[in-house]
Image: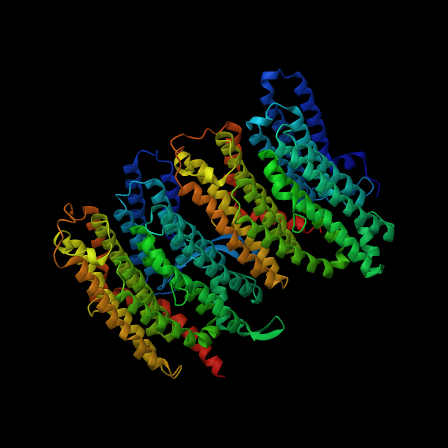
Amino acid sequence: MTIPAVPIPILSFIVFTPLVGALLLLLIPRHQKDAARAFAAAVSGFTLLLALWAFVAYDRSAGGYQFVERMSWLPQLGIHYYVGVDGVSLPLVLLSALVLFTGVLVSWNIEDRPHELFAFMLLLASGIMGVFVARNLVLLFFFYEIAIFPKYFLIAIWGSTRKEYAAMKLVLYTLVGSIIALVGALALYFVSPVRTFDMDVLRELAARGAFARTVEVFGQAVRFDYLWFLPVFLGFAVTAGLWPFHNWVPDGHSAAPTAGSMFLAGVVMKVGAYSALRVGIELMPGGAVYWLPVVVFLAVVAALYSAAISLVQEDLKYVIAFSSIGHMAFVTIGFAAMNVTGLTGAVLQMFSHGVMAAILFAVVGMVYDQAHTRYLAHLGGFARVMPLATLGFILGGLVAMGMPGFSGFVAEFQVFAGIWAARETAWWYPWVVILAAPSIALSAAYILRALQATFFGDLDLKRYPHVRDVTALDKVAIVTLAVWFVLIGVFPRVMTDLIQTGVEPIASLLQGAMVASLR
Amino acid sequence: MELSWGAHLWSVLPEIVLVLATAGIMAVDAWLPEGRKRELGYWAIGGLGVALGVTVVQAAQLAVGVAAPYEAFGGSVRADLAAMLFRVIFILSGILTVAISMDFRPLRQSGEYYVLLMASILGMGLMGAAVNLVTLYLALETVGIALYLLAGYLRDTPRSAEAGLKYFLFGVFSSTVMLYGLALLYGFTGEIAYARIAQVLPELPAPVVTAALLLVLVGFGFKVSAVPFHFWTPDVYEGAPTPVTAFISVASKSAGFALLIRAMMEAFPTAQASWVALMAALAFVTMTVGNLLAIPQRNLKRLLAYSSIAQAGYILIGVAAASPLGIAASIFYLGIYTLTNIAAFAVAVIMTNVTGSEEIRDLAGLSRRSPGLALAMLAALLSLGGIPPLVGFFAKLFVFAAAIESGLLWLAIAGVLNAMVAFYYYITVARAMYVDRSPEEGKPVPIPRPSHFTLWFTVAGVLLLTVLVYPLYRLAQMAAQAF
């Protein structure tokens, strides 16, 4: 089903352009700050163009993995440089490139060591996009870990409030999760009848039930996939901010600089969810069928809890930070539906929330740059001075509340429809819908509250005498992101058709495992 | 089969070159006028370079099969790929150490320094090749005596003198205990060659074998600074001249592992069940204690000392796995660790030259002061922590994989949790460089040219070997097949 490799290794270009750019950036003389900014913008813009090209050039009627590249790396251990994109990973690659480009634009005015700032951002983007294209488990972990340490520096150097605490907390949380998942992946390798980390082969084996066999651990006989699904899935879910492993999210998102928050909420959380899908669900479908109906409870708690707690935050950035936990919970609920509708909704929610979080954090950063405070009680009336940024926030907010006509509605509706369609799976599935739905109403409440307090009402001219509109670059960033909400809201098939080609094999894998478990 | 003289000499050719080079250094030392003693470093690098070239050629011959492994001098040393690869590690770390020693103020005027360094490399080469108890002990002591003197080289500095004395006392004590174990082995088996001992061992009563094993392990444990034989490590690392610390932390540790791996695999293969459990326990305790004690350190050299204890723990995981993958993983890890740790110490040497201090807080503002130097240190720290895209990631991946393959799942889990603890304190050093501010940050840090070489070489290695990981792993694997 794989398509012959295209002559240009486009995925390698997408992944390594930022990495090489980061290294070259450090060679630009220290005092030439504008040169560094322009170079970072050029590199990220080029990456975005490549990602857009891949998005357009992907053959949707053929589906499957495309733009495949394969090179020998450690052949004896079954480790290859093997990359490709399908309908699930391609939207996320595009999302990462969008957030990278707009993140560079909104960081233009940072004066403290812009060389290093952009180098760490590019490195982070490189790691993130590497995870999305990797088709070899070791390669996936390789990129996953690359995407951890730049976050520490982005937050600890350029962040605000309790930045070092938040940075260390975030890094340790995600690191623990990823190394637990890594042990699971190694266990998978040694239990597999074929010693390889090639995810195509492993998925093939998983489909035939190779990981449903019984193994002996500490003297107990247990099914391998029952044992290892949970550590691997939850290990990655830490990065996706799943309750009760979400604790790093509010601190990390709030302490990070604007571009850092855009990255964290926009794409880093998707890296966790994506890896949980690819490694946890796809390689151990038996374990997924066994555990996901239980894990869905965590997601329901996350959705309600985050929406409720967002409602009472005094700090504008914490409102958005907590809300991202809830939106990511819908991704997990979509996974738990284990059918095409639910999975499509989950992946679309990843893309939609990524763009939405990026735009909301970008606007929050713009407000903070002018007001030097994020306390809702001190803000107000900013719509008058920064109309476009306000529009961006409103659009992002409408997506967050799941308003029909925007991408969030398309995604969340499919998640609920998927769960409803899967109500045979467990008697409590209809209750998942009933319990999680109120969180959408709550999200409307907190978005409207934040919107009202920040942008409407009277502008306190005594407190903010010098407030100006956002810069032209900021406007470019807002427009670049906002276009996608409307596009997907009005023409959902731009994304859903693509995503469906990617999730169909996963859904059939899960259906197969379900049938096998009933036998 | 009777060996020709040529074959005998071929087996220790690197050592012969080293002896000649050492003699050459002494002659040059006598001939160079007082003001030009710094140039001795270039001569030493030249001599070591020739030895390295010879060793690489020999290793290549063994690797492609032009030459076959054999034992020479009546079963004293073996010429095989493992012995040659370990020699490459020792000589390379010698060259890199000399390059950072040349401009280290207290050291640079002396010929004896280089002579002692080369004598210890000579002993290490024999440690890696030794296949009987007598060679083992002689080689160990050659290295030990040279290193005791080097650790206490700065006689006028009390801390260095203390380090030398401490190292000496601990060293002598542990090698005496080990000697008792060797005597026990010889007394019960009547043999000194590993292979023959291995044949007789199954007939001995189990308590004797266990006692001999434990006593011998004291000596090895001291060399690799495994817990609970690690007490000398922080003090000696702190007190010794920093380039010597760098050398002890990589070359001496690798030599200890060379000895350990060969002795365990060749002399005690029949007692594997008991030493695997022992190694696993040792690995667990070593990495855990090393990592936990590294957290509160404020002195960079002490932090790196505890980190090097912890690294010994990870390497022991590969030994405990006792499989071809495990041994290959340990050898691979040693090679990578050598490059990485020297990079970290090179930065420490340069900073000590400038600030006169070894405190972590004096790295503050380094990323503004000298971005390149900060980046080199960051690369070294992340590689030690096993974070990609640096090659340390693969070193850790291999040892953990080997543990899981051999059924030591608990050890692999303990290992990854330890890696997380380690990441915490490595990042605190990085934090000082990148986040903290300092009034000195306007002054650039001068980097002498030889140190530049060490930095570039090690950092480029740590980065590029990620791409070229396969050839290196393959070499380690071929070397592991010798056992």
Residue A226, given in percent of the width and then of the height, sits at: 51, 73
Total marks shown come to 0
Image color mode: rainbow
Look at the image and tell me in which quarter the N terminus of chain B lies.
top right
- Say which residue appears at 58% left-offset and 22% top-offset: B38
Residue B27 or residue B199, whichever sits in front = B27
Residue B343 or residue A282, whichever sits in front = B343
Task: Examine the rendered structure and indicate whether residue B422 appears above or below residue A435.
Answer: above
Using the rendered view, name the quadrant where residue A439 is placed. Answer: bottom left
Residue A502 visible in the snapshot: yes
- Say which residue appears at 29% left-offset and 69% top-offset: A308
Residue A79 or residue B334, whichever sits in front = B334
Residue B204, given in percent of the width and then of the height, sits at: 84, 59
Using the rendered view, name the quadrant where residue B172 is placed. Answer: top right
Residue B324, given in percent of the width and then of the height, sits at: 66, 55
Is A20 displayed left or right of B454 in the figure?
left
Residue A156 or residue A434, whichever sits in front = A156
Residue A170, given in percent of the width and then of the height, sits at: 41, 56
Residue B130 visible in the snapshot: no
- Say which residue appears at 76% left-offset and 50% top-offset: B216
